Image: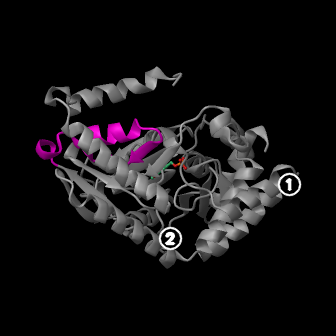
């Protein structure tokens, strides 16, 4: 066995059990064997990247139904280069000058409620191109007249985001947003990085749609930009300019394409059944834990994912939801649960990246941590404000030795 056969051992890394779904900070998703083979087959070879990306365009068009497509380093870079494309078009001289837009139209609009953070802020990914950001409406309200005002003053493009992070009420629906922009001949870029739905934005005429190659598709780190020929070409050409600092290599292009093909032919029903079995197992194991109440929860944006919601009653469970997720994350192996609503007293267990043995370990760990907390003194408890403060200081501890 080669020394790199087990990098966890070689570099002393902690194993992580993923009960939270796809998350960049823990390695996104589990790359499947055929994708690993595809990537392995290109790594030691040479290939024309232009040809590989032209094949990518064919595969993406066939599966997503757009005129063209290309693979980018990730969804965030697809957004930056896609926005740049709407400023420069295919003008090579302009592409080399970016992010300096000269006298070109560089205003790019986005609803305020779509200005989310997926690990970094979306407004920044837009502005990195050289665009001037035009926020529409207020935090939880955007009307057509907000969009029309921006369109009347002139826009290079408008960005629409679909994500569980966006504000859920008061926003313009995608059809109305695209239809309004198109009345003013303004292209729309739809960021669907973590969505399964490949039909809706294309049917509604989105000019560029962005998917992540490493989220639900389980590919290598990559983004997929699919859309009309002109804007995809201009997006690809950004590799001669700002796209260079977010370069995608042959291995990521091949990994994204293999993952997309596999995903389009996958037995999604079989996958759902496997996930249901894990949800059943968790429900059975956790249903009688005092302080926990369980319910099944459908994904916010309509992805076909069901998660187990654990509502933690701090009086009975002897700890808060955020403490439970923190303790699970501190174990070896670390168990990462979905805790973006922890401040509301609930956690979610996501079955999509787990096998049955790991699912058992998750249930064991939850029970163990609840039992441990029960035997501790109540004065050790961490308030939400304390956790919030710690979390903002945590990034500054890197690099750590543990
Ligand atoms: C995850 C995510 C991104 C960033 O995706 P990467 O491929 O990791 O760059 C961008 N937008 C949305 C809506 C996301 O969910």
Q: Nearer the viewer, residue 97 or 297?
A: 297
Q: Which residue is mark 2?
A: 205
Identify which residue is drawn at 21% across, 54% down. Answer: 289
Q: Residues within 10 Å of mark 1 (few under 14, many from 20)?
A: few
Decide: marks 1, 2 in contact (CB < 8 A)? Answer: no
Which circle's residue, 1 or 2, is located before the other in the chain? 1
Q: CA distance from mark 1 to mark 2?
A: 31 Å
In the picture shown, does residue 128 fall above or below 356?
above
Check the image and name the residue furthest to the right: 46
Quadrant in the picture for residue 307:
bottom left
Q: Tell us which disc is closer to us: 1 or 2.
A: 1
Residue 284 in view, yes or no: yes
Q: Which mark is residue 48?
A: 1
Answer left or right for 353 relative to 8: left
Please say if 203 is above or below 15.
below
Q: Is residue 264 above or below residue 356?
A: below
Q: Which residues are magenta?
A: 313-342
Residue 366 drawn at (x, y percent): 32, 48
Q: Give the crowd class for mark 2: few <14, some 14-19, many >=20 residues within 10 Å.
A: some
Q: Quadrant of the N terminus?
A: top right
Residue 306 shown left or right of residue 215 in the figure: left
């Amino acid at each position: 066995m080669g020394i790199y056969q087990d990098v966890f051992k070689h570099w002393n890394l902690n194993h992580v059990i993923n009960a939270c779904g796809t998350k960049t900070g823990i390695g996104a998703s589990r790359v499947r064997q055929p994708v690993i083979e595809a990537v392995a087959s290109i790594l030691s070879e040479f290939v024309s990247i232009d040809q590989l990306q032209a094949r990518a365009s064919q595969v993406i068009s066939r599966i997503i139904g757009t005129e063209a497509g290309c693979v980018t380093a990730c969804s965030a870079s697809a957004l930056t280069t896609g926005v740049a494309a709407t400023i420069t078009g295919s003008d090579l001289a302009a592409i080399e000058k970016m992010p300096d837009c000269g006298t070109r139209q560089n205003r790019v609009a986005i609803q305020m409620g779509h200005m989310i953070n997926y690990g970094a802020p979306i407004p920044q990914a837009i502005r990195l191109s050289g665009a001037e950001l035009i926020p529409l409406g207020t935090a939880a309200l955007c009307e057509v007249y907000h969009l029309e005002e921006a369109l009347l003053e002139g826009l290079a493009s408008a960005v629409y985001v679909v994500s569980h992070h966006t504000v859920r009420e008061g926003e313009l629906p995608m059809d109305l947003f695209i239809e309004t922009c198109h009345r003013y001949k303004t292209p729309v870029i739809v960021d669907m990085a973590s969505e399964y739905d490949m039909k809706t934005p294309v049917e509604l005429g989105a000019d560029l749609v962005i998917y992540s190659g490493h989220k639900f598709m389980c590919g290598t780190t990559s983004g997929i930009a699919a859309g009309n020929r002109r804007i995809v070409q201009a997006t690809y050409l950004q590799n001669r300019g700002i796209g260079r600092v977010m370069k995608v290599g042959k291995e990521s292009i091949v990994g994204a394409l293999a993952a997309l093909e596999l995903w389009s032919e996958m037995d999604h029903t079989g996958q759902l059944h496997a996930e249901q079995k894990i949800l059943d197992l968790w429900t059975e194991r956790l249903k009688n834990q005092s302080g926990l109440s369980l319910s099944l929860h459908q994904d916010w944006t309509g992805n076909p994912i069901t998660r187990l919601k654990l509502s933690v009653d701090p009086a009975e469970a002897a700890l808060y939801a955020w403490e439970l997720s923190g303790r699970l994350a501190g174990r070896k192996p670390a168990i990462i649960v979905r805790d973006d609503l922890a401040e509301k007293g609930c956690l979610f267990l996501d079955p999509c990246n787990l096998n049955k043995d790991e699912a058992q370990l998750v249930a064991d760990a939850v029970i163990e941590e609840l039992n441990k907390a029960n035997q501790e003194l109540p004065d050790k408890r961490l308030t939400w404000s304390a956790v919030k403060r710690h979390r903002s200081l945590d990034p500054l501890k890197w690099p750590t030795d543990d």
